[in-house]
Image (cartoon, helix red, strand yellow):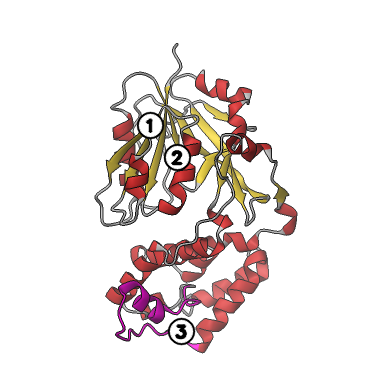
Amino acid sequence: MDNPAIICLTPVKNEAGILDRFLKCASLWADYIIVADQRSDDKTREIASSYSKVILVDNPSPTYNEFERQKILLSAARRIPGPRLLIALDADEALTANFLCSPEWNTVLQAPVGTIIRFQWVNLLPGCTSYWLSPYDFPWGFIDDGSEHIGEKIHSPRIPLPTHAPMIALQDIKVLHYQYTHWERMKSKRRWYQCWERHNHPSRRSIPIYRQYHHMDAISQREIQHLPREWLSGYEQQGIDMTSIYREPVFWWDREVVTLLEKYGTVKFKREDIWDVDWSALAQKINSTDQPVEYCDPRSAFDKYVHRWLTKTQPIASRYDVRLIEGILGFVGW
């Protein structure tokens, strides 16, 4: 059987600061890079269009929906004839550079139709010299057999996952994740995630939301490892900058939170951990106005205490006494 066309599937929205590096890396292994842009208002589309391997498609949705955007990406990929290897990566990710020489790459290319490819996730830390490894591997590759994709609005599978499909779990080639190299950008995204949960799942308790979106605060020092240089060096030898961090004046996730505060008020989000930001000042900056905007912290003294307690106990959240207190707090709305 001929080797499949290698197709990278990537959703984007306002990723101009990181997209160039991603596309340079993906261009080394992908035959096609399908980029689904969701109404970006920065230079994302311009950057994507400058790469010969990119097929730029529109995601016109005004709302966040991972299932719908993956349907757009898959539909575009399936218009490419012949056998297809789909690899679904976000713009803040890259394959480790050892794909250039690892025998695992040939194993993937020769896998039978319907095979799912699982990757370990390397979470890079600031400075790009250390990382922690996610405890699970993730199904982000698929030798396409046309199976239906079933997903969720958020934290959705990126590829079809047919029942009883054969799987290959890669040990050598991994996925680099740059989200945690820029802590403020990451925190902005996590604030938005919490607001999204509150708006879309109003009955969900705030403590589980906090725990889910602060998992990085529970990483112990013993989990942090030194980054092997060969995971970056193959790219650097191609002249790709793998370490610099683009710093944006305002993150688009914070703009989204300001829109939610404007539409629904602050009280709705008072138990979410978003109040480390002066939203009034940020709203004035975003809207380029001198008119005062009041988005004051709506938390009571008790609410602030609970947030401090959550921060302190995040590394020990699985302990029985912590879970017992969480249960008690549930009776008062937490």
Residue sitting at x 47%, y 28%:
164
Percent from the top left, x then y, of residue 158? 42, 41
Q: Which mark is residue 260?
A: none
Q: Nearer the viewer, residue 192 or 252?
A: 252
Q: Identify residue type, mark 3.
A: Arg
Q: Does residue 220 appear in the picture of this structure?
A: yes
Q: Is there a contact, CB below 8 Å, between mark 3 and mark 2?
A: no
> Pointer 1: what residue?
53
Q: Quadrant of the N terminus?
A: top left
Q: Does residue 152 appear in the picture of this structure?
A: no
Where, by quadrant of the figure, is residue 71 drawn?
top left
On screen, residue 3 above or below 165: above
Q: Which residues are magenta?
A: 274-300
SS assignment for the magenta stretch, majority? loop
Q: CA distance from mark 2 to mark 1?
A: 9 Å
Q: Identify residue type, mark 1.
A: Lys
